[in-house]
Amino acid sequence: MLTDDQVKQFQKKGYLVFERLIQGEKLAHYKGVFDELVEQGCSLTEEQSNWALELDATGAPSPGLLHKVQGVCVVDDRVLELAKEPAILDRVEALVGPNIDAFGTKFFPKLPNGGTSTHWHQDNYYFGTNSDCIVSCGIYLEDADTENGCLRVIPESHHSMEIVAHKKNPAMHGSWTDVDESQAVDLVIPAGTVVVFSANLLHGSNDNFSDRTRYSTAWHYIPGDLQMDRFVRGEYEDRHIVRGN
Ligand SMILES: O=C(O)CCC(=O)C(=O)O
């Protein structure tokens, strides 16, 4: 269900944006599911498995400030239904094939006034591969703009197939790399938008400087038969068959 032009654009630019793909009651339903997770996460005083809190300047977790739910489809199987949404999979199928798994599921609430998700990186850095069979997917449950930290991409940066060096700071979640920000595109998008992109694409987002949340959930779609050392089908808990076999 992608046009030839869309497939070409994915190949050329490394990403595709589907505005308002999840709509109306469906969007409200999923937003409600994530509200529940935020409520749960914001009662945490220390980190727990799957649940990460924002870090203060010394790298200590900040009680009550949820940063991320890693493995969100394991924590709440209602989110797995979103990973199986036909509107998404019909499009992803054109890039990944008929048998599709999703792995590495996460939710970022990006809370107001300082909430974080990820800075510049390539997803494949984390997976120890430069495979171009991995299609990352971000779903934005709320309007995302430059104030609340929309997704930013470096178009065409997936072409080199090179995984660049990433750095780590103990007072920050995740690893990141430097990019030429003059090449960056801000994806200012309305609620319900789905972005798919190559796992080799440089992308990231700024922190949330607004007084609004910016909920997003993300994972990676792969062909069901793709072998991955650390994410073995049937063994790795956060790898799910979402279409076909
Ligand atoms: O928060 C975002 O929009 C970026 C998320 C992201 O880059 C990731 O999950 O790898």
Image (cartoon, grey):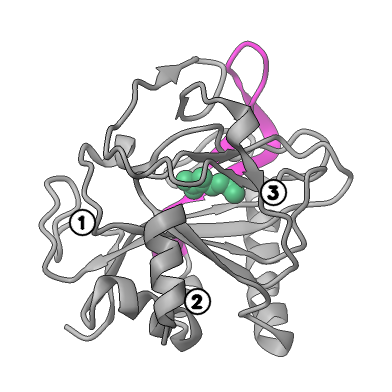
Q: Which amino acid does label 3 sit on?
A: Cys
Is tag 3's residue or tag 2's residue first in the polypeptide sequence? 2
> Label 1 crowding class (10 Å Cα cut-off): few <14, some 14-19, many 20+?
few
Q: Name the residue under label 3.
A: 150
**Could you tell me if the residues under marks 3 and 2 are in contact, i.e. CB atoms within 8 Å?**
no
Element carrying mark 1:
loop
Give the side of residue 84 with respect to residue 61, left or right.
Answer: left
Give the side of residue 228 with respect to residue 18, left or right.
Answer: left
**Could you tell me if the residues under marks 1 and 2 are in contact, i.e. CB atoms within 8 Å?**
no
Magenta range is 52-75
User: Would residue 105 be visible to someone looking at this image?
Assistant: no
Q: Mark 2 points at which residue?
A: 82
Give the side of residue 97 with respect to residue 77, left or right.
Answer: left
The mark lying in front, picked from 1 and 2, is 2
Give the side of residue 44 with respect to residue 202, left or right.
Answer: right
Q: Which amino acid does label 2 sit on?
A: Leu
Q: Residue at image x 53%, y 35%?
A: 47
Does the residue tagged 2 have its C-beta within 8 Å of any atom of ligand 1?
Answer: no
Does the residue tagged 3 have its C-beta within 8 Å of any atom of ligand 1?
Answer: yes
Q: In which quarter of the image is residue 205?
A: top right
Is tag 1's residue or tag 2's residue first in the polypeptide sequence? 2
Q: Does 237 appear in magenta?
A: no
Residue 72 percent across, percent down from the top left: 46, 59
**Could you tell me if the residues under marks 1 and 3 are in contact, i.e. CB atoms within 8 Å?**
no
Q: In which quarter of the image is residue 62?
A: top right
Residue 223 percent across, percent down from the top left: 20, 69
Q: Which mark is residue 236?
A: 1
The mark lying in front, picked from 1 and 3, is 3
Q: Which mark is residue 147?
A: none
Element carrying mark 2:
helix
